[in-house]
């Protein structure tokens, strides 16, 4: 998005200098007043008003108009007129400036006599023929005369944009934000937000947010405020759209207030909602912080409609449960069955998201995993090798071994390993070692290929990554000599002990020796002490027995010639106690290896 576009500049000025429109007929909490009302009226400053209006370039010279309690502010003069009633404003279709009026009168004397219905039909017919967002904005600048026109233009812009590829979307977004009609469209949304129908309101907010208008702008915040005011008037469809929009916004005062109100409304409405699509949108909006009773209500409502479950809904309900962090086995079983029945309709990323959802919910369904693995194996010839790696990684996290897929992928690696970058190599090593899979009849060739790839990356691999790679190959029963030699070099293994330190002493443990005097590790007159500062959680509960990872680390250090001393609860001591404590352990041969 172009940071210098007129729209963003305008929205930033609005957000800094103008308070949100306030409904004078309702009580406003004090925090809202502080958050929304400016310290002074920026419109009283003529210089500000001129600079503010100059931000909006308009080829038709349309004026900027604000609703400010009892007055309209125009850019074409200093006269302040009383605000018209809602009915008058709703029926008024005349332009806002004398220049627009003159242009329309010059264009056609018969316009006033033409029924508004005919103009609407012509406008919406033209709108349906638009094939790209710029066409819609061009139409809006030429023919839009009502708030209904503007809201439909906005939602059509978003509908056309989301059907494009990512690269096309980036290009079209730049054109949208640089288009003068988009600025005018946003002006109308801000000015007429309280006159919109409930559907236009929520769909406009949804479109504005998804088009990328920043959340902290006055436009987005005003639409959120109006949604709060009209929340009880929203039907179930509008609630669904609003819930989807809120799920993609960051927490702020208006979003939090709207979510709280939506939660109260959902409690009342859920029993009457028979559409799984709406229910899963509510699940996403309620999120993991929703009370348990509300999650159970949503669960019961979904189960009531489970016989009408479609593949699309099954996939979305999976993600809705993840958003709530709620594992409902009956719902997940039903969704899994529907996904298995329609596996050939599933897209690559959809399956990845489903597998990740199973991991997040700690849901294990071997039939589902087997079905996905068999399907991926059946289309492996048309998948990119990186896509196969993603599937293998997802299965590894679940602890599921797709043996046929792993065998086919091993053949691809041995045939051509050039596609394996360092990140992919580490994933492959981790997957095959954790799932303990050895390719039948070719595991030696497979290991040699992986080792050759690892050797190629030795000059650039980090010590931690190298340790993981060597560890994975060793688990599989293969010893990578070059990699192991590099790992055992002093600068490598010492870098793996960030929370530890080493002391070198004489054989009687009476004198600390400088490092330069003990470079010969084979010198039996030198003792090498390694202090590991570890948390209590590294030991079995209530004992000093080290858990697996710590025990393995201690064994490795012993093999390297270190006398290992484990230090617990060190931070609980005062400095003086810690010094005396360590002195007693360092200078004593009989000191316990665990402090």
Image (tube, grey):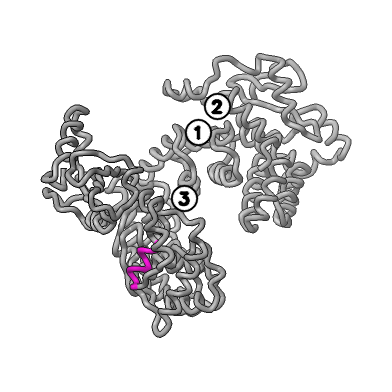
State the residue at coordinates (53%, 20%): 37
SS at mark 1 in the image: helix
Q: Position of residue 406 (x, y in %)?
A: 42, 75
Specify whether residue 327 is painted magenta: no
Q: Which mark is residue 225?
A: 1
Q: Nearer the viewer, residue 254 or 302?
A: 254
Q: Position of residue 147 (x, y in %)?
A: 65, 39
Mark 3 or mark 2: whose residue is earlier in sequence: 2
**Disc 2 and disc 1: Cα gap in Å?**
9 Å
Q: Nearer the viewer, residue 278 or 179?
A: 179
The image quadrant that residue 64 belongs to is top right
| Other-residue count near label 2 (Cα within 10 Å), few / some / many at <14 / 14–19 / ≥20 | many
Q: Are marks 2 and 1 in contact (CB under 8 Å)?
A: yes
Q: Which residue is mark 3?
A: 240
Q: Given the current orientation, which residue lies at the most extreme bottom position?
A: 441
Q: Which mark is residue 20?
A: 2
């Amino acid at each position: 998005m172009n940071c210098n576009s007129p729209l963003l500049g305008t929205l930033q000025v609005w957000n800094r200098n103008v308070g949100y429109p306030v409904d004078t007929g309702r009580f406003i909490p004090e925090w809202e007043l502080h958050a929304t009302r400016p310290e002074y009226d920026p419109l009283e400053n003529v210089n500000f008003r001129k600079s503010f209006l100059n931000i909006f370039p308009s080829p038709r010279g349309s004026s900027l108009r604000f609703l400010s309690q009892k007055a309209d502010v125009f850019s074409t003069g200093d006269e302040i007129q009383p605000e018209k009633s809602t009915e008058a404003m709703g029926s008024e279709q005349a332009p806002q400036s004398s220049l627009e009026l003159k242009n329309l009168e010059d264009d056609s004397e018969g316009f006033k006599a033409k029924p508004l219905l005919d103009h609407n039909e012509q406008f919406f017919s033209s709108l349906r023929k638009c094939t790209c967002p710029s066409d819609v904005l061009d139409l809006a600048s030429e023919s839009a005369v009502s708030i209904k026109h503007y809201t439909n233009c906005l939602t059509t812009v978003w509908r056309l944009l989301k059907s494009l590829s990512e690269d096309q979307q980036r290009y079209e977004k730049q054109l949208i934000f640089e288009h003068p009609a988009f600025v005018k469209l946003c002006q109308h949304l801000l000015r007429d937000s309280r006159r919109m129908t409930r559907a236009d309101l929520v769909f406009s907010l949804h479109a504005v947010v998804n088009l990328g208008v920043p959340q902290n702008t006055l436009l987005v915040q005003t639409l959120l405020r109006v949604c709060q005011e009209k929340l009880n008037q929203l039907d179930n469809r509008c609630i669904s759209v609003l819930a989807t929009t809120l799920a993609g916004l960051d927490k702020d005062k208006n979003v939090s207030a709207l979510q709280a109100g939506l939660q109260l409304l959902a409690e009342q409405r859920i029993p009457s909602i028979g559409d799984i699509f709406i229910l899963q949108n509510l699940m996403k909006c309620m999120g993991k912080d929703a009370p348990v009773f509300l999650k159970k209500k949503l669960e019961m409502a979904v189960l009531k409609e489970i016989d009408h479950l479609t593949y699309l809904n099954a996939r979305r309900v999976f993600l809705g449960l993840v958003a709530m962090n709620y594992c409902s086995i009956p719902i997940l079983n039903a969704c899994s069955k529907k996904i298995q029945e329609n596996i050939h309709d599933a897209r690559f990323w959809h399956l990845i998201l489903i597998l990740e959802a199973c991991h997040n919910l700690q849901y294990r369904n071997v039939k589902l995993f087997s079905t996905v693995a068999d399907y991926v194996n059946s289309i492996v010839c048309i998948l990119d090798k990186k896509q196969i790696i993603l599937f293998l990684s997802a299965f590894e996290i679940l602890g599921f071994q797709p043996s046929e897929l792993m065998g086919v992928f091993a053949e691809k690696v041995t045939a051509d390993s050039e596609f394996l970058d360092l990140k992919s190599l580490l994933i492959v090593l981790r997957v095959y070692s954790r799932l303990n899979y050895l390719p039948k009849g070719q595991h030696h060739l497979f290991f040699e290929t992986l080792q050759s790839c690892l050797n190629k990356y030795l000059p650039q691999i980090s010590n931690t990554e190298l340790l993981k790679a060597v560890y994975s190959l060793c688990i599989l029963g293969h010893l990578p000599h070059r990699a192991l030699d590099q790992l055992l070099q002093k600068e490598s293994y010492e870098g793996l002990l960030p929370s530890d330190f080493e002391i070198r002493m004489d054989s009687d443990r009476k004198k600390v020796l400088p490092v330069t005097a003990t470079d010969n590790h084979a010198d039996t007159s030198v003792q090498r002490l390694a202090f590991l500062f570890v948390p209590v959680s590294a030991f079995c509960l209530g004992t000093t027995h080290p858990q697996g990872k710590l025990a393995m680390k201690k064994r490795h250090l012993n093999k390297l010639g270190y006398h290992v001393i484990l230090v617990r609860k060190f931070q609980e001591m005062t400095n003086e106690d810690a010094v005396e404590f360590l002195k007693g352990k360092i200078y004593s041969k009989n000191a316990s290896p665990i402090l």
